[in-house]
């Protein structure tokens, strides 16, 4: 079922540099700084399990080198046996990592942290309302436990994004499976950018251009011969630009970041299982990056609503003030952007 290989990298740190009898550094010592940097870009399974042993009793902690998707791995296991949960699974490389709406998650080994959590709780899909928002709260709390230079620069964008200075720092993907009468299995996937936001932006732009080109070619090949006029293309809404943790946490150690996040996420799941989103609503609104700002709601590439972001209701739905009154946005299939008003733009649609 699982063809991922275990990772237990043998990496030297600066403290292990050897010193010759005359006090000069050996070749190992000369490269200690480089090796330390390499270590910060890898997942150290033994260190991760040791640091999580007290806070995550009863959790399985898995660290692998390569897999298709940690979310798909855990979903497959839950379908076979829900007793596999609770489990955390992290991978250095995901060859089929996914984001929202089936998009490929762009990443490079060492530059992004990618992991998933499997958990089983009582209830059904309706009881999970607001879980993605509570997850975002836990991610920001975990990052704030690190010595960041500007923790106040973190924020949340409804419903699934963690922002840093307005750029997308992390994404959240939640998937579910039945887990028996009155129970539901949950897999939460997290992807967080650690380094090289500029390179990531280039890869995202390239992927978007390729997708647009493919869609255009498909549309042209499928056009009816009854007319030579091509349909007007749907305007492409630019993605939220990426951000990387290194801008507020130089040379982030991958294992340290994972430990900080998992501690908060596992505690969040236990609390959510008993109290639901109500226990996190106030914190989410305090972290809301777009609170009080003019926004646009986009669905299938088109604006469907302009207004002012107010906050969320008790189910985690976005509340938007428009000239026609308050609207509630429930679908996670829409995108939210800040509104850059142009002349003649209506306040609400």
Image (spheres, rainbow, N blue to C red):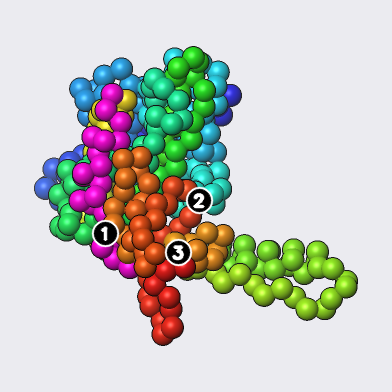
Q: Which badge, 2 or 1, comes first in the chain's sequence?
A: 1
Q: What residue appears at the point 45 percent right and 17 percent down from the top-left corner? A: 182
- In the rendered structure, are the residues bearing label 2 and label 3 in contact, judged by CB atoms less than 8 Å apart? no
Mark 3–mark 1 CB contact (< 8 Å) = no
Can residue 226 be seen here? The reply is yes
Q: Position of residue 338 (x, y in %)?
A: 36, 67
What residue is rendered at 50% in x and 51% in y?
Answer: 333
Residue 42 visible here: no
Q: Residues within 10 Å of mark 1 (few under 14, many from 20)?
A: some
In the rendered structure, does residue 165 fall within the stretch colored magenta? no
Q: Disc 2 designates what residue?
A: 333
| Residues in magenta, as a range | 274-296
Of residues 27 and 8, the one drawn nearer to the viewer in this rendering: 8
The spot of residue 183 in percent (x, y) is 44, 19
**Distance from Cα at disc 2 to Cα at disc 1:** 20 Å
Q: Nearer the viewer, mark 3 or mark 1?
A: 3
| Left or right, 325 with reference to 220 | left
Quadrant of the rendered image containing residue 168: bottom left
The residue where tag 3 is placed is 305
Q: Camera-side residue: 53 or 121?
A: 121
Magenta segment includes 276: yes
**Nearest the camera: 224 or 106?**
224
Nearest to N terminus: mark 2 or mark 3: 3
**Distance from the alpha carbon under mark 2 to that under mark 3:** 14 Å
Q: What secondary structure is marked by label 3? A: strand
For marks 3 and 1, the one nearer the N-term is 1
The image quadrant that residue 251 belongs to is: bottom left
Please name the residue that numbered disc 1 is placed on.
291
Q: Quadrant of the N terminus?
A: top right
Vertically, is 147 above or below 208? above
């Amino acid at each position: 079922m699982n063809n991922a290989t275990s990772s237990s990298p043998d990496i030297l740190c600066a403290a292990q540099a050897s010193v010759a009898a005359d006090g000069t550094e050996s070749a190992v010592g000369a490269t200690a700084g480089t090796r330390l940097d390499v270590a910060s870009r890898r997942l150290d399974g033994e260190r991760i399990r040791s640091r999580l042993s007290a806070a995550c009793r009863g959790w399985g902690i898995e660290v692998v080198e390569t897999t298709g998707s940690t979310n798909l791995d855990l979903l497959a296991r839950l379908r076979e046996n829900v007793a596999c949960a609770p489990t955390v699974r992290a991978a250095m490389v995901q060859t089929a990592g996914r984001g929202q709406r089936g998009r490929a998650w762009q990443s490079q080994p060492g530059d992004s942290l990618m992991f998933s959590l499997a958990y089983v709780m009582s209830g059904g899909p309706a009881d999970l309302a607001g879980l993605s928002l509570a997850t975002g709260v836990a991610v920001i709390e975990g990052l704030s436990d690190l010595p960041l230079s500007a923790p106040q620069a973190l924020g949340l964008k409804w419903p699934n994004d963690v922002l840093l200075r307005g750029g997308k720092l992390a994404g959240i993907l939640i998937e579910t499976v039945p887990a028996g009468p009155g129970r539901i299995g949950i897999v939460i996937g997290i992807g967080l950018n650690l380094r090289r936001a500029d390179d990531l932006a280039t890869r995202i732009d390239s992927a978007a251009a390729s997708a647009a080109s493919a869609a255009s070619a498909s549309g042209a090949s499928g056009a009816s011969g009854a007319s030579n006029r091509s349909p007007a293309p749907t305007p492409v809404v630019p993605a939220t630009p990426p951000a990387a943790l290194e801008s507020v946490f130089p040379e982030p150690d991958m294992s340290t970041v994972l430990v900080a996040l998992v501690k908060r996420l596992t505690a969040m799941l236990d609390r959510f299982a008993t109290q639901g989103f109500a226990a996190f609503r106030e914190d989410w609104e305090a972290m809301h990056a777009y609170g009080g700002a003019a926004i646009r709601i986009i669905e299938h590439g088109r604006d469907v609503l302009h207004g002012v972001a107010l906050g969320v209701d008790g189910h985690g739905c976005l509340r938007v003030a428009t000239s026609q009154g308050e609207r509630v946005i429930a679908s996670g299939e829409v995108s939210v952007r800040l509104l850059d008003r142009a002349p003649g733009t209506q306040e609400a649609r």
